[in-house]
Image (tube, grey):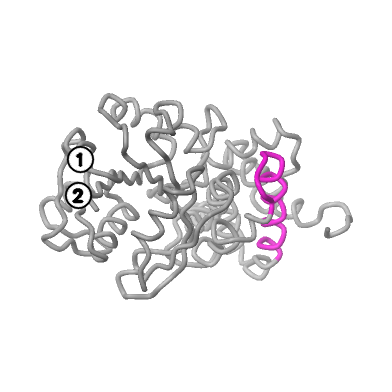
Amino acid sequence: MKISVLGCGRWGSCIAWYLDKIGHEVLTCGLSDAPEFIQLKNHRKNDYLTFPESIEISDDLEYAVGRAEVIVISISSQYLRSYFNDISKYDLDGKIFVLCMKGVEVTTGKRLSQVVGDFVDTSKTPVAVWVGPGHPQDYVKGIPNCMVVDSANREVKEKLVSEFNSELIRFYLGTDLIGSEIGAAAKNVIGIAAGMLDGLGYTSLKGALMARGTREIARLIKALGGNEFSAYGLCHLGDYEATLFSPWSHNRKYGEQLVKGEKFDKLAEGVMTSKALRKLGQEYGVDLPIVNAVYDVLFEGEDVEDCLRRLFLRSVKQEF
């Protein structure tokens, strides 16, 4: 299968490496002036992995789109709309888009598959999402994990699972696109909260954070029309180890360094996602105390310790 991976950051480069490893014809495409693209173009490697000669590297977006049957996108979620302003100029009929970033568009509150749907007829150009746990640092060592492919098009997601499955990544068929996307995006916000707890020395509270965070996001998924049990699957709870505990988690690290007054200069998708989810919670009347606490710290300048103390000392209520 000819696959083009658009975006060559940490996860995008890992996806290209993985899809090549399992036998697909892979091209990776990035912006010519982006440091991560220049590094791959000049040295065929980055901080995480080395590309074999079989992976083609290009900055020609039209060529990358034109050659591919499947187009995988792994960029910052908030840039997806502007990116599709360029991609949609080309003939996309019959191609399959797979979105691998995790977020919700802040300006509209739309899930990422909905953003793509603003540009393409999904009956002709189907859209899928690839979500779940895992870090490049583990995959390149041969440490396996499980992930999910979901789509409104059953035939497409069955095809992708069949083509992408291997001993390194076992893929499951998602059954709830709303839940898969919201759950995957929201786990990054919970990850920032976990990092804040780490930074304050309250790591033992992460068990409570996991339990209440999952319940909170389940309520939101249900209100949006999805299956609340999706929050307990690989898209959300199943990704907690990689997001709330791993030293490689950007969102956890962002929260920890924020508390310590240190600057984190890498992408933490949970920052803008907290803003988007807060807006959705208000619009749909869903109580999101953890999301709101993260938002208050990041955007309202509230004291981290005061905010977390209020969060965990809320009024007495039934657990379920």
Q: Eyeballing the image, is 68 above or below 282?
A: below
Give the quadrant of residue 145: bottom left
Dot 1 or dot 2, earlier in sequence? 2
Residue 178: percent from left, percent from top: 58, 44
Residue 253: percent from left, percent from top: 47, 58
* Residue at x-position 69% and y-position 51%: 228
Pick the residue in front: 308 or 240. Answer: 240
Q: Name the residue under label 2.
A: 27
Q: Which amino acid does label 1 sit on?
A: Ala
Q: Which amino acid does label 2 sit on?
A: Leu
Checking the image for residue 266, the label placed there is none
Magenta span contains residue 262: no
Does residue 309 appear left or right of residue 273 in this picture? right
Q: Mark 1 points at which residue?
A: 64
Give the quadrant of residue 7: top left
* Residue at x-position 60% and y-position 48%: 179
Per the rendered image, the range of residues in magenta is 208-228
| Contact flag, marks 1 and 2 (Cβ < 8 Å) | yes
Residue 202: percent from left, percent from top: 65, 66
Separation of disc 1 and disc 2 at Cα? 7 Å
